[in-house]
Image (cartoon, rainbow, N blue to C red):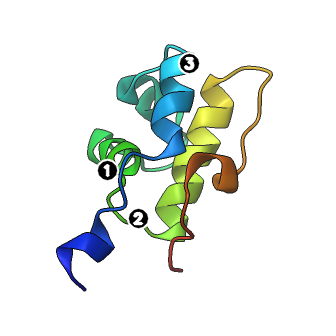
Amino acid sequence: MTNNEMNLGTQPLDQVLTELKLGNHDLVNASTEHLTHKMVNKGRKGRRLTRNIQTKIMNALNAAAGDRTFSIEELFNYRGKA
């Protein structure tokens, strides 16, 4: 895989977190699964993640966002591999 295939540009996740005034630390704290700051940072910047990590980020965001819920398709513009 080339570097261009690994870096997909800033993801919609970054804009959602900015709008909700949430940081990477907020997602890590809200997560009940093993989620690290590095995973969230990679997700925001568009570094390719597995579907499992995308799901962990989505679950943490849904826990931190209160009454709003988001799907993986709203947060990432690519589908992570299983």
**Distance from the alpha carbon under mark 1 to that under mark 2:** 8 Å
Image position, residue 73 (x, y; %): 67, 56
Which amino acid type corresponds to the residue marked 2 in the rendered image? Leu
**Distance from the alpha carbon under mark 2 to that under mark 3:** 22 Å
Specify whether 77 is left or right of 40: right
Determine the residue located farthest toward the top in the rendered image.
21
Specify whether 63 is left or right of 69: left
Tell me if residue 61 comes above or below residue 79 in the rendering.
Answer: above
Image position, residue 12 (x, y; %): 53, 42
Mark 2 secondary-structure assignment:
loop
Give the residue at x 59% y 56%: 55
Mark closest to the chain's N terminus, 1 or 2 = 1
Mark 1 secondary-structure assignment:
helix
Mark closest to the chain's N terminus, 2 or 3 = 3
Mark number for residue 49? 2
Q: Tell me the quarter of the image containing the N terminus.
A: bottom left
* Residue under pointer 3: 19
Determine the residue located farthest toward the left in the rendered image.
3
Which amino acid type corresponds to the residue marked 3 in the rendered image? Glu
Q: Nearer the viewer, residue 79 or 25?
A: 79
Density class for disc 2 (Cα within 10 Å; few <14, some 14-19, many ≥20) is many
**Distance from the alpha carbon under mark 3 to that under mark 1:** 19 Å
* Residue under pointer 1: 42
Q: Mark 2 or 3, which is nearer the eye?
A: 3
Give the residue at x 39% y 43%: 44
Mark 3 secondary-structure assignment:
helix
Image position, residue 72 (x, y; %): 65, 54
